Image (cartoon, rainbow, N blue to C red):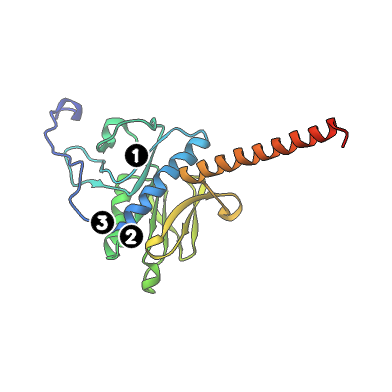
């Protein structure tokens, strides 16, 4: 009888970085989307680690069984957990949601990514193609969801938004060209955007300024009443 995996010394090299280039728009989309997903889940009272562009390995002793999602969600994992690379066999936790920005060369993401994410066991995979307008063979959104043992393509759209079952929210494109970003939205048909940190800070400043103006107006009105005007 063979040894249990936990009793075997694992000398496999599991890389934590990948030496490949990426488009600037891909990086900018990730930088905006990751903290928005994190905020949305936190506000829903859901504990989760939301990561970006790190290797996720699902088969011990096989470093080729790996993906590096542009954004991913690990449900039930504390948000402040330090992660260099995620090894599924150590915790049993598989990402519930993964998001990939499709490169200009679409074949890798359109054909290879769904197969690999199916092997990983992810519950929902969203592919976003910022180059969809360049070819009739491309679509802005592809959404794969796990049904039983299979990861099935359930939604294909060139609209500006799709709904994520796992997040319980909408993913919505804003901007065009190099200004393209993906935002989290909620409400009927995804009409309300979850604010970024900068937008939330600006809204808080505006609320304080409005409250100060209303207080000054109230004080002025009370002073006029005191003087009998």
Of the numbered discs 3 and 2, the one sitting upstream in the chain is: 3
Quick one: SS at disc 3?
A: loop
| Left or right position of 171 against 68 | right
Q: Is residue 44 above or below residue 160?
A: above
Secondary structure type for disc 1 = loop
- Image spot of residue 182 (x, y percent): 43, 54
Which quadrant of the figure has residue 76? top left
Real-space CA distance between mark 1 and mark 3, rounded to the nearest whole angstrom: 25 Å
Viewer-proximal residue among 177 and 59:
177
Q: Between residues 6 and 202, which one lies in front from this camera angle?
A: 202
Q: Does 226 appear above or below 131?
A: above
Q: Mark 2: which secondary structure?
A: loop
Horizontal relation, residue 198 to residue 129: left or right: right
Q: How far from the left and from the top, in percent, is residue 203?
A: 56, 43
Query: Residue 102 bears which disc, if any?
Result: 2
Which is more toward the observer, 142 or 19? 19
Name the residue located 47 percent from the left edge and 39 percent from the top edge: 39
Q: Identify the residue at the far bottom of this view.
A: 136
Within 10 Å of the Cα at label 2, are there few (<14), some (14-19), or many (20+) other Cα atoms? many
Q: Which residue sits at x=30%, y=55%?
A: 113
- Give the residue at mark 3: 22
Mark 1 or mark 3: which is in front?
3
Toward the right, the furthest residue is: 228
Q: Of marks 2 and 1, which one's residue comes earlier in the chain?
A: 1
Cβ–Cβ below 8 Å for labels 2 and 1?
A: no
Tell me residue 209's x, y (percent).
61, 40
Q: Which residue is mark 1?
A: 94
Farthest residue to the top: give it: 7
Q: Residues within 10 Å of mark 1 (few under 14, many from 20)?
A: many
Relative to the observer, which residue lies in front, 69 or 196? 196
């Amino acid at each position: 009888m063979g040894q249990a995996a936990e009793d075997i010394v694992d000398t496999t090299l599991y890389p934590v970085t990948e030496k490949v280039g990426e488009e600037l728009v891909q990086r900018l989309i990730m930088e905006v989307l990751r903290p928005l997903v994190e905020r949305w889940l936190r506000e829903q009272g859901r504990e989760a680690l939301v990561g970006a562009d790190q290797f996720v390995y699902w088969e011990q002793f096989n470093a080729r069984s790996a993906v590096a999602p542009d954004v991913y969600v690990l449900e039930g994992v504390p948000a402040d957990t330090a992660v260099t690379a995620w090894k599924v066999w150590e915790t049993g936790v598989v990402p519930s949601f993964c998001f990939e920005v499709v490169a200009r060369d679409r074949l890798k993401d359109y054909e290879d990514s769904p197969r690999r994410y199916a092997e990983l066991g992810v519950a929902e995979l969203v592919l976003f193609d910022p180059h969809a307008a360049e070819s009739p063979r491309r679509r802005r959104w592809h959404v794969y969801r796990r049904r039983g043992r299979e990861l099935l393509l359930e939604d294909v759209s060139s609209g500006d938004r799709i709904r994520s079952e796992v997040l319980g929210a909408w993913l919505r494109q804003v901007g065009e060209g190099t200004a393209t970003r993906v935002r989290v939205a909620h409400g009927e048909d995804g009409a309300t955007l979850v604010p970024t940190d900068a937008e939330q800070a600006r809204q808080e400043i505006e609320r304080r300024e409005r409250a100060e103006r209303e207080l000054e107006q109230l004080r002025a009105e009370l002073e006029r009443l005191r003087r009998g005007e």
